[in-house]
Amino acid sequence: MAIPEEVIAEVRARTDLVALVGAHTALRRQGRRFVGRCPFHEERTPSFSVNAEAGLYYCFGCHASGDAISFVRATEGCDFVEAVRRLAAKAGVALPDDRDEQGSRGPARAALLDALTRAVAFYHQRLLEGPDAGPARAYLRSRGYDGAVVRRYQLGWAPDEFDALARALRVPDEVFVGAGLGFVNRRGRQQDGLRGRVVFPILDPSGQPIALGGRVLPGAPGPKYKNSPEGPLYKKRRTLYGLSWAKQAVVARGRVVVCEGYTDVIGCQLAGVEEAVATCGTALAEEHLRLLANFAKRIVLCFDADRAGQAGAARVYQWERTHQVDVAVAELPEGADPAELARADPEALRRAVDEARPLLRVQVDRVLGAFDLREPEGRAKAAEAALVVVAEHPDPLVQDQYLVAVADRCRLDPEQLRPLLARLPRGARTEGPRPGEALVPGGRDGRPGDGRPGTFGSQQEAPPGPRGPERSRRAPAGEARAGLEALRLAVHRPEAVGDRLDPCLFADPTQRQVLGALLAAEDLHEAIGLAEETDPAAAALLRRLAVEEPVAEVDDVVAQLVRVAVQRALRALEAEARRSPERAAELAQEANQVRSTLERLDEQPADREAVEGLVAWLAGRGEEDG
């Protein structure tokens, strides 16, 4: 389906790009832009920038760039039209009727989201007011949940009726089933998926309901928890319960606490551990770690250490290395879960989280604690068992330090244990960085992104361009920097720059393309589209400039740009005089007049009339050369 340009523009305008990106990585304000770690590549130093006003993003590390539509395409793996549909649904923008196309694609995302939102409201109201929800309200009060907690977390009650929700929503079968709200039974009637359960809405990081979880009341038959099935909106391995509430605290404290259940998250957050989240009926997966690593680099597992490595301890260690995070374990009292401890002793819960230790250390201590270390036989067996755990770690340096610690605990010589460790199967080893190789990923040119390249007066060159002859025609670094700052002003303060910039001032061909697109377009998005048609490098540079703030005054920038352009033209004039002796005197006189005018640029402020005269001279020379 072809979506009109004006509709696409409205979707862009009504989409909060900071909120959209903020669901994938933590962003903080820096001047007029927002910065954070790039969601598209691993990094420790934030190099990802968002211009909220223009609705554009750019990464100085991997050079990913675009707008809200391209971000959705990259993160959700959909095509352009589907990305627009998803954003339109969130922004409340009506798209042209596409019912003819929906047969092969199933119900529209907007319809699924609307059904879930209405379902959450139905269940929540039933819990607050329904006579049949009395036992549920009593149960929640016994857990310490008052009305404020119920409302904050939008808790609900699913009546023990087979179609209470279906009758309330009255949506088509494909929407009811696609949203994970229930199924169509043998009689062809919609039947609710949750019955007689306390309902916990599962939200995406932006706060939009995408699934439901239900818990039976104590003593009731059936499995304790039941979640919505996976579908178009809900993927367990990509979802963390509570992240929409926790992400602000996660960023502030630099850590995230991972629990196992909905009540654990609520209990932790009520006890002051506001950075708590939970997996949704599945073990911790790498997709979870990948998402969390964009918000914090310390991951605290707040459940039994033996469960901490459900996916395999060696795999957790590898995730630490791949995603550059530190995984620790909060050790709770025997038999306690976070929800119970939060209610009985919130201070103990906070202390356990604050004192969380590395997963390997906890596992080694537990293994050693299972043996009688008073006897030689017990110490030998304990050392052997502990080395099996140590061998799972992929880093030889970490292994050796734990080997020494095991030897000390077991009163053995480390040299006796090293041959034993060497014979054990190793954990998920990967080739680490070679000596002298950077640990922090950088840009394609091997330099780590610092989040602010190319500023006026800095030492960094213009962005990498094509190799070969075109590369050799690029402007020297000083001229390129002046051109970049001028273009930043043209992007961010067009009213101040006005018509003071001319293509003749730019030696870099990509920068000239950028200026041409800006002069020809009505707005920044149109300029990017025009540049994309003629020079993708210019479009990429425009997206980058959109997230960089000008750092110099307009008069200073224009004067500097004119100065370097005139100096370049004077060198060409001198070369022309050498090639044409018969015109040497004439050209020398012209050069002297230009140098005299150029000196007026050194005044503070620079002579505006001199600037305009030199631009006119440069433009005239360009026409002669053409």
Image (cartoon, helix red, strand yellow):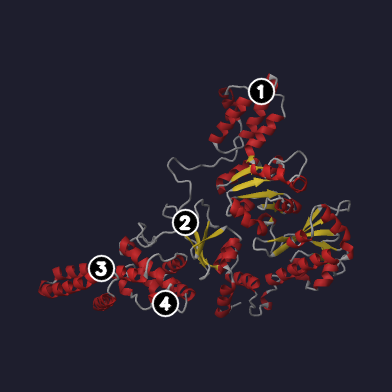
User: For this rendering, which residue is in front, 540 or 148?
Assistant: 148
Q: Residue at x 14, y 74 (%)?
A: 589
The CA distance from mark 4 to mark 3 is 25 Å
Q: Mark 2 vs mark 3: give the one in front.
A: 3
The label number, if any, that marks residue 380 in the structure image:
1
- Of the image marks 2 and 3, the number of the one nearer the N terminus: 2
User: For this rendering, which residue is in front, 143 or 258?
Assistant: 143
* Quadrant position of the N terminus in the picture: bottom right
Local crowd at mark 1 within 10 Å, few (<14), some, or many (≥20)?
some
Identify the element where label 4 is drawn. Answer: helix
As shown in the figure, which amino acid type bears the numbered disc 2?
Gly
Q: Mark 4 vs mark 2: give the one in front.
A: 4
- Of the image marks 1 and 3, the number of the one nearer the N terminus: 1
The reply to whether dot 4 and dot 3 touch (C-beta < 8 Å) is no
The CA distance from mark 1 to mark 3 is 82 Å
Residue occupied by mark 3:
602
Residue 211 on image: x %, y %: 73, 62
As shown in the figure, which amino acid type bears the numbered disc 4?
Glu
> Image quarter for residue 344?
top right
Q: Residue at x 64, y 63 (%)?
A: 206
> Image quarter for residue 598?
bottom left
Q: Mark 1 vs mark 3: give the one in front.
A: 3
Local crowd at mark 4 within 10 Å, few (<14), some, or many (≥20)?
few
